[in-house]
Image: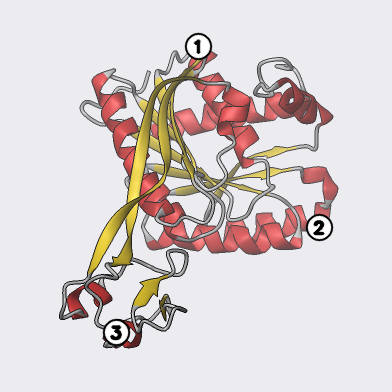
Amino acid sequence: MLTQANHVKQLVILSGKGGTGKTSISAAIADLAHSSNKQTLSVMVDADVDAANLSLVLQPQKSEVHEFWGGSVAEIDKSKCIGCDLCELLCRFDAIFPYPDDTGTYFVDPIACDGCAACVFGCSQEAIRLIPQQDGNWFHSETRYGELFHAELFPGKENSGKLVTLIKQHARLRAEDTQASLLIVDGPPGIGCPVISACAGADLGLIVTEPSVAGIHDFQRILGVLQHFKIPAVVCINKTDIYPEGVEKIRQFSASQEVAILGEIPFDDHITQAMVQGKPITTPFPDAPSSRAILEIWEELFSRLT
């Protein structure tokens, strides 16, 4: 087992873009961490709160449901508004409009409002206040592979980076309480705030890339993020047989950046079959080519984390 005292090792799995197979590989690694002879006790985080899908594979049973209140929206008390139009002038988001009833008073469009509070502080009549908004829910669940922390951000809501930070904090505390040795974070795609939140405190970043033009481009971008935050990075290449020239480009770029390639996973129909069953590929098809490749990657990840 991973045995560094008072420190839970954090593995964040990233892709830079959607569709590389990152979540399928994350689920397989969670299965291998749970079932391999390493007997690694792990806690998992699905940090893709905008479009969470790790739960589709791990089939969690929710044990806790919590509301996420991430932001606020301004609201104008019409009875106090004197129609001075200062709030409209102060609003950088064009979210404040005069009422169409010709009373000279104003109202806030809650969709356009960013909750910056400029209008609140600028109103001489104290007619504007911020109303807290529920932006989503987060969950603590049980799976056959270990405990999972995941969340669902409501459509159109922001603060996804804040929500990722929240569930990661709870997952880390839970890992410490249960003396788990590994925190597996299935990161969101892209390079924005949610990704940065998912990377915070990571001991190792595994980049899942694919040999396509977009895959290579976004692999370079997400590697730049990990390098910026001084997080050690390794790579695995998925669907290697769809574009051999792309695989060679990834190898050359990885070598130029001194980033190790831990494994190459062939395109495998068994992954689709496992997804239909709602299971990690390593559970129903442990001898499939992709399962064997992911096992080798997990062995190398475990070696580096210890």
Q: Is residue 72 left or right of residue 298?
A: left
Seen at 54% across and 51% down, the residue is 155
Q: Quadrant of the N terminus?
A: top left
Quarter of image, res 57: top right
Seen at 20% across and 79% down, the residue is 123
Image coordinates for residue 142, horizontal then vertical, percent: 45, 18
Type of the residue with mark 3 = Gly
For label 3, the residue is 83
Type of the residue with mark 1 = Asn
Image coordinates for residue 158, horizontal then vertical, percent: 44, 57
- In the image, residue 13 sits, relative to residue 159, either above or below, namely above
Quarter of image, res 116: bottom left
Q: Which mark is residue 37?
A: 1
Q: Decide which of tag 1 and tag 3 comes sooner along the chain.
A: 1
Marks 1/2: CA–CA distance: 37 Å
Marks 1/3: CA–CA distance: 71 Å
Local SS, label 1: loop
Looking at the rendered image, the disc whose residue lies closer to the viewer, 1 or 3, is 3
Local SS, label 3: loop
Q: Quadrant of the C terminus?
A: top left
For label 2, the residue is 245
Q: Decide which of tag 2 and tag 3 comes sooner along the chain.
A: 3
Q: Residues within 10 Å of mark 1 (few under 14, many from 20)?
A: few
